[in-house]
Amino acid sequence: MINWLSSYNYDFDIVSLSIQILLLICYCARKNMPVRQNYSFLHAMMANFLVSILDIISCELLAVWQQIPVVFLYFFNMAYFFMFAVRVWYMFDYVVEITRAYRWVTKKDRFLVALPCILYLALVITNPIHKGIFAIDSVKGYQSGFLYKGLYHLSYFYIGVSLLTVLNRIKKLSKRIVLGTISFNLVLLVGLIFRNAFPKTLVMGVFSTFSIFIIFLTALNPDIYYDQETKVFNKKAFETIITENLFKKYSFHLIVIKLRNFDALKTVYGINQILAAVESVGDWLSLQFPMVNVYYFGNGIFILSWRNTADFEEKIEKIITRCTEQWVARETEVTFSPAIAVIKPENIPQKAVDIIELIEYVIDNNMDYQDGGYLVVDEMIVGKMKRKRKVEKTIAKVLKENRMQAYFQPIYSTKQNKIVGAEALARIIDPEMGYVPPSEFIQIAEQNGSIMEMGRQIFERVCEFISQYDLKAMGMEFVNVNLSPAQCLNEHLAEEFKKIAEKYNVSLNMIDFEITETSIEDLLKIQAQMDNLKKEGATFSLDDFGTGTSNITRLLSLPLSVIKLDMSVVWSYFKGASKILPDLVNMFKKSNLRIVVEGVETKEMCDTLAEMGCDYEQGYFFSKPIPGEDFIKLISKETK
């Protein structure tokens, strides 16, 4: 039992100090994000700890003030008031940082908000002169001055501004942040009221510590910013740190590391072994480059960011050298082959989301083709990424306005010596971007999921085209419509297409759906879709055969009528690079499948393929893909 000199009740402050010490140890023991909100929080904790210590020391000294030099009494009491104001400021500064209010607050506004705290600190420092906050009387000892209540008013002011800041940004903040910031400010408010009502009980330290504990639990949970597999920062941490770096106009490099064939390695070694090996990579990067922020985006992707712009080549050399050795994980030796890209400061976008988009673009489109060394992301790559974003916006706009166009490429029958069908091909012709190649927009639409709506609109254009012209009377037997892999997984596909066909009074026996080898990965689902559409009269073709790796037996188990041989197989034959084409034709003919060959561009190719036994031909020799009206003119002219 401690025999205190003063009559104050320190029980609450002692409990508060114990909790503060634990919080400081826990916080400092882990790696925290190098961002201002964390620095503000750490400063608030330290200020709060000093306020609690100084509160006890100053109260104890005042109990025996006659025996203590006046200069010491002034020093410790002024230190208490000073640190109290500093704590108030850092708690407010934390709110500004966690809400990212600095984005819309000017430097002038920030100075005006800081002015009350600056003025109060000036009053504390000059208190021995004016004695407005407190005085040490030679007879009565400690005496509160007319400015004493200013400390409470200062606290009320910053709590009020903090709450207004949160309310102003509430729509852009998560519930966790909103509840946390409002809660800890209300706790501080209650503490101030309680301290004012019971000045002999030192409870303010408990309330402020409780406020800090709320922040610790709600906003500073490390699990939110750490990848659980590698124990390094995750994508959310990357966005937070990089956003602050951009705002402060820091110059920094990024290194992107992609562990090649990551999915295949999980199959070879097993998921647990690979995850353990990835954790070893994360540990090595963190230890090797202690001044660098290391992030893991998942799926074998590491990102390094740092502000020193001079030594990125040295870092890359170390990474490449280390990856020539094996990583030992759970008594298994794993070999990773890294693909590395560097993004220099001049090519880094000015928004964190745009940087992430650029990283993902580089990973998906450039890094798989690296052969040793590393890729420097230049203006050309950045330009391609911007082009992709522009195409995405155009796709969204075109689909919203229902402006997808269908072009038609003739399909020639070698037996009837005439055009008997067509393949409908999606086209985008935008007033701003002009003609957008299918090689661009199809891949993007498949990645972002808009391929579903695109497929619906193209099918509707086809039905509209068939209903507008009497194609059968013109000798047309079918129109081919492409189905993407995503569409094939849509359980309501048959029902949706049936409704569209009925809307235009079109029979599905005029439609031949083309699927790719990728589409048949889920054999049961695609078979169910095919059966449902076949009941309505539709037929099916396998498109682009020769570009995939599917099992022939699986292919032949599907209700297919036609096999379309990809132009790469056809051109390879005519260039003399491969002689497999006749064997493929014979194999499928023996399976009672009709053969369509793509990429026919000359009379020689047309005649040779007909002699080989191909049933249909398609290519620029007959016509490039053309609008519906031009296609009608073409077949009308041929009929005449």
Image (spheres, grey):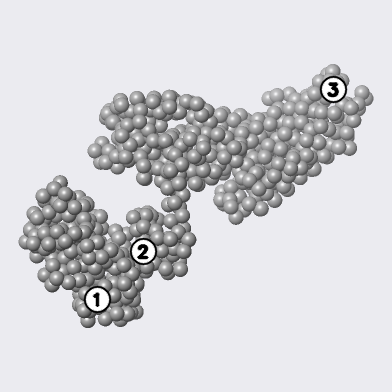
Disc on res. 513: none
For residue 491, say whether it is visible: no
The three-letter code of the residue at mark 1 reads Lys
Q: Picture quarter containing residue 273?
A: top left
Q: Position of residue 408 (x, y in %)?
A: 29, 68
Residue labelled with disc 1: 637
* CA gap, disc 1 and disc 3: 113 Å
Q: Position of residue 640 (x, y in %)?
A: 21, 79
Query: Which residue sits at x=84%, y=20%?
Result: 71
Q: Secondary structure at mark 2?
A: strand
Q: Secondary structure at mark 1?
A: helix
Residue labelled with disc 3: 65
Query: Mark 1 or mark 3: which comes first in sequence?
Result: 3
Q: Nearer the viewer, residue 311 or 296?
A: 311
Q: Nearer the viewer, residue 342 or 77?
A: 342
Residue labelled with disc 2: 427
* Disc 2 versus disc 1: nearer the observer: 1
Tell whether 22 sits left or right of 139. Answer: left
For residue 353, say whether it is visible: yes
* CA gap, disc 2 and disc 1: 24 Å
